[in-house]
């Protein structure tokens, strides 16, 4: 998607450790019209796949996932990253957070995933694939079908995309970064 590449070049900031900061439209301030354009891209790709549920992880995936849920007219479930007193009877998995550098449990209450649900996963970034693999683990526990994964920004120089595609999963990334240079603040996209 040309526009997301332009926005990343214009407003993105490369941080040490291969982290891209896009707080102006995706990770802090949200640009609803632009996020809606992204949601439409995934809708076009997956609209004939009988999607019955959208699944994401808190927090940054939620805004995108809600817009996608509006288009498909289906519920959106976000995995929570920590246990709390108002969560019970959950599926859970463990993921490694790339940006926080630590492991988290992710949880989804069992009542929100039905056997046979056709699930589209939506997330803001794909790096090493831990978040997606954790969600897939939960979908397997719930006997749901994975329709595909919609990612706003894939960092193609990390392993996540390869791992998921080698499993035969349809991963639709709106921008794939080939390389990022912290010193020059330069980003190259995969064409
Ligand atoms: P993965 O689990 O694929 O290694 O990383 C994906 C998750 O880590 C995303 O849900 C996102 O929240 C976070 N993440 C990974 N890389 C970046 C990055 O460069 N920038 C930002 N803002 N988040 C990232």
Image: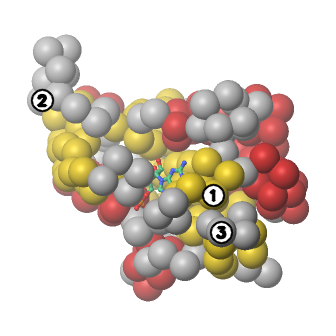
State the separation of the CA atoms marked 2 and 1: 40 Å
Between disc 2 and disc 3, the foreground one is 3
Q: How crowded is mark 3: few (under 14 residues within 10 Å), some or many (20 or more)?
A: few
Question: In the rendered view, does 1 fall on the left or right side of 143?
Answer: right
Mark 2 vs ligand 1: CB below 8 Å:
no
User: Eyeballing the image, is 151 above or below 113?
Assistant: below
> Which residue is disc 3 drawn over?
183
> Which residue is disc 2 drawn over?
89
Between disc 1 and disc 3, the foreground one is 3
Looking at marks 2 and 3 on the same chain, the residue that comes earlier in the sequence is marked by: 2
**Residue 116 position in % (x across, y down):** 35, 51
Q: Considering depth in this image, is 71 or 15 the residue closer to the camera?
A: 15
Question: In the rendered view, does 191 fall on the left or right side of 95?
Answer: right
Q: Which residue is drawn at 67% across and 28% down?
A: 29
State the separation of the CA atoms marked 1 and 3: 9 Å
Between disc 2 and disc 1, the foreground one is 1
Secondary structure under tag 1 reads strand
Q: Which mark is residue 14?
A: 1
**Residue 154 position in % (x across, y down):** 59, 65
Quadrant including the N terminus = bottom right
Looking at marks 1 and 3 on the same chain, the residue that comes earlier in the sequence is marked by: 1
């Amino acid at each position: 998607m040309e526009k997301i590449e332009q926005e990343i070049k214009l407003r993105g900031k490369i941080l040490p450790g291969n982290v891209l900061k896009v707080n102006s439209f995706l990770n802090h301030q949200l640009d609803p019209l632009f996020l809606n354009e992204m949601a439409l891209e995934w809708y076009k790709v997956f609209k004939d796949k009988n999607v019955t549920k959208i699944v994401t992880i808190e927090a940054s995936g939620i805004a995108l996932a809600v817009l996608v849920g509006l288009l498909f007219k289906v519920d959106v479930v976000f995995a929570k990253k920590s246990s709390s007193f108002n969560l019970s009877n959950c599926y859970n998995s463990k993921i490694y957070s790339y940006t926080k550098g630590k492991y988290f449990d992710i949880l989804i209450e069992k009542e929100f995933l039905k056997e046979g649900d056709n699930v589209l996963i939506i997330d803001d970034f794909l790096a090493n694939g831990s978040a997606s693999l954790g969600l897939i683990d939960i979908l397997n526990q719930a006997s749901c079908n994975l329709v595909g994964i919609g990612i706003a920004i894939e960092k193609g120089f990390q392993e996540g995309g390869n791992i998921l595609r080698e499993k035969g999963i349809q991963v639709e990334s709106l921008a794939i970064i080939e390389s990022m240079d912290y010193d020059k603040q330069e980003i190259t996209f995969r064409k």
